Amino acid sequence: MRGVHKETHLVERIGWLRAAVLGANDGIISTASLILGVASAATAPGEVLLAGVAGLVAGAMSMAAGEYVSVSSQSDTERADLARERRELAEMPEYEAEELAQIYVGRGVEVGLARQVARQLMAKDALGAHARDELGLSQISTARPVQAALASAATFSVGAAAPLLLVLVAPTAWLIPAVAAGSLIFLALLGAIGAWTGGAGVLKPTVRVTFWGAIAMALTAAIGAMAGTVV
């Protein structure tokens, strides 16, 4: 007898991968842009570093709070839908069974078989069957606010640390080009790693994240230079 074949699908990573890539990407772009803007205003290296550290701390806290609030809202909606579905299952089980059967019919299952499948699934886990097939909820897509908040804060901090490291090691005269070039390299690596981890093609995500990162840094540096000239 052959053993059961266990499959691992890349979509199972989508929850934490989205938060991780978003956090690291935002950490690199926002901190590098802040550093370039401050440095372009002819500020001393120590003040540039201080601004970058402040940006790291503030950004990490903002990412954590934003992700927690956003994903908590999603979680609240999911719980409300499940509560409504649980109530409907208790009050009109036959209607809910037929509703589930019609979902399978719409997917191409013969009517009689669809009703058998609906009854069998509901006998085992009625709420789970309706959550999955009627509401589109599953373990993979379930909102996890704390996980998303921690992942975003941690990855933002890691991403923000990269341009800060460049400030520490780059000569003062080369600080702006070193931070700009190094941050674009970090962004390209992030795009490639995120795409590879998610099982997607590497080139398009890498170009996309690098392009928009370059635009953000260029605009911030230009504004910093103009502000420095005025001041």
Image (cartoon, grey):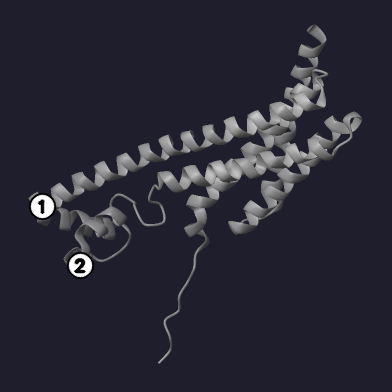
- 170 lies above or below 14: above
Q: Quadrant of the N terminus?
A: bottom left
Whether residue 34 sits left or right of residue 87 in the image: it is right
Task: Point out the tag, 1 or 2, that comes first from the N-terminus.
Answer: 1
Q: Secondary structure at mark 2?
A: helix
* C-alpha span from label 1 to label 2: 15 Å
Residue 128 lies in quadrant: bottom left
Residue 228 appears at what percent x and percent y?
Answer: 80, 13
Callout 2: 10 Å neighbours few (<14), some, many (20+)? few
Q: Is residue 188 visible?
A: yes
Whether residue 74 sits left or right of residue 54 in the image: it is left
Callout 1: 10 Å neighbours few (<14), some, many (20+)? few
Which circle marks residue 90 in the picture?
1
- 44 lies above or below 105: above
Residue positioned 73% across, 23% down in the render: 220
Q: Looking at the image, which residue sits at the far top?
A: 230
Q: Amino acid at mark 2?
A: Lys
Look at the numbered discs 1 and 2 and tell me whether their residues touch, using CB distance below 8 Å.
Answer: no
Residue positioned 37% across, 39% down in the render: 72
Residue 158 lies in quadrant: top right
Of 161 and 140, nearer the camera is 161
Residue ID for mark 2: 124
Q: Amino acid at mark 1?
A: Ala
Which circle marks residue 111 in the picture?
none
Residue positioned 71% across, 35% down in the render: 213
Whether residue 22 sits left or right of residue 42 in the image: it is left
Q: Quadrant of the C terminus?
A: top right
Residue positioned 54% across, 51% down in the render: 17
Q: Looking at the image, which residue sits at the far bottom?
A: 1
Residue 46 appears at what percent x and percent y?
Answer: 78, 27
Residue 184 appears at what percent x and percent y?
Answer: 76, 40
